[in-house]
Amino acid sequence: MKNLLKEMIVNSPQDRISYHDYMEAVLYTPNIGYYVREKEKIGTTGDFYTSGNVGDAFGRALARWFIYLIKECGLPPRIIEIGAGDGKLAYDILAFIKETEPVLWSSLTYILVDSSPYHRKVQQERVGVFNQVAFMDSLENLPNVNGIVFSNELFDALPVHVIEMYKGALEEVFITVEEGHLVEIKEPLKNQDILNYLSKQNIMLNEKQRYEVPLKMIQEYEKIVSHIQSGVLLTIDYGYTEQEWKEPAHLQGSLRGYYQHKMMKKVLEYPGEMDLTSHIHFDTLIESGKNVNFSMEGLFQQNEFLLKTGILEELKDHQETDPFSKTAKRNRAIRGLIVPGGHSEYFRVLLQSKNLAEKVRLFPE
């Protein structure tokens, strides 16, 4: 990977590449990029956890809500998960629906979309036994959708451009090679797409503030929504509103690495071996949705959303003394997802809809 990066830099017109191109290379280069190579990324032997990998409570809560949307709100029984990772969340959702709703189960279609050949292989091993499941490698192959589309930690894994305000002028941060090492350099911001984004979103940076510009996120979001004729779009991720980006705590931006469950601020280390991630821009997704007739139904803290969808229904009384029993572990996972300071504290849920019938209640009372 380091040789590839150095070759990219040497062959570039000005001997440097953008952070966007760096992240695209180290995360998605076929066979050697972090997300596409054959390596476990999630869980104990990986580099990070997701909500769906902390037991099955998260998946069961989503499944319970999906059932409500289909049975009570009249949505078609079609669920599409974008960026399905190792398939664990899909399995928990499918297992719950099969267990509790045999009639709905017989008509259900669940599509997993993932560009990683390794992930698709793992998904097929995990959920391929279900006849209701289909696998796709690209949104281009996604048919026009009426139903439920969702993602869990998809957009935070996309490349971003990095800019900074320095002495009253905007600069873009690039990557180059000095004495054999990857280092940052800054140049006056000239990328017109970035300038257009800042103008459209009315972004004003403070002195020495860093900011990640999510052009790739917008492209991928527009691909997704272009396929949705009617239904709900659920985005689960960590991120901020534009007002929150202005807070002092966020002035150094949010680009981070995760390597063997350690957060790494030096994001040029371990290229291709380390997860890179940044907090997403929820206001941008909201405005992009409005531009194509998606209604904003709410931006929730994840624990608030899970409570609205009925996750407490999963809590079970038990008299077992074994702390590692299935019920005990699920109860602990639920508490971890809903209590202040738990796993949900860092995540938000954006709910958008298109062409739904009037007066549809998207949450049970």
Image (spheres, grey):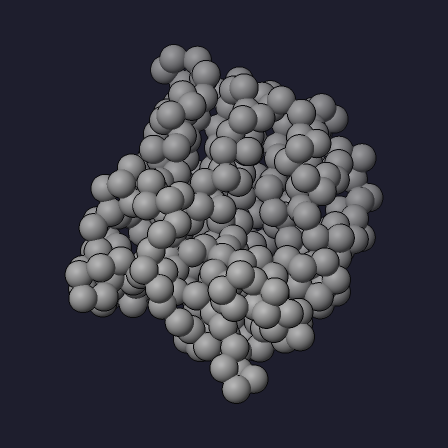
Quadrant assignment for the C terminus: top left
Which residue is depicted at the point 66% across and 63% down?
33
Left/right placement of residue 21 relative to residue 119 reads left
Position of 15 with respect to 336 (left or right) is right
Front one among 239 and 51: 239
- Residue shown at 49%/46% (left/top)? 216
For the image, the number of numbered tags is 0
Q: Answer above or below: position of 121 versus 23.
A: above
Residue 354: which quarter of the image? top left
Return the residue nearer the eye: 165 or 261: 165
| Residue positioned most to the top | 358
- Residue visible at 47% across and 69% down in the picture: 175
**Residue 16's spot in the image, x, y percent?**
50, 67
| Most foreground residue, 298 or 306 | 298
Residue 54 visible somewhere in the drawing: no
Tell me which residue sits at (57%, 57%) in the image: 24
Residue 38 appears in view: yes
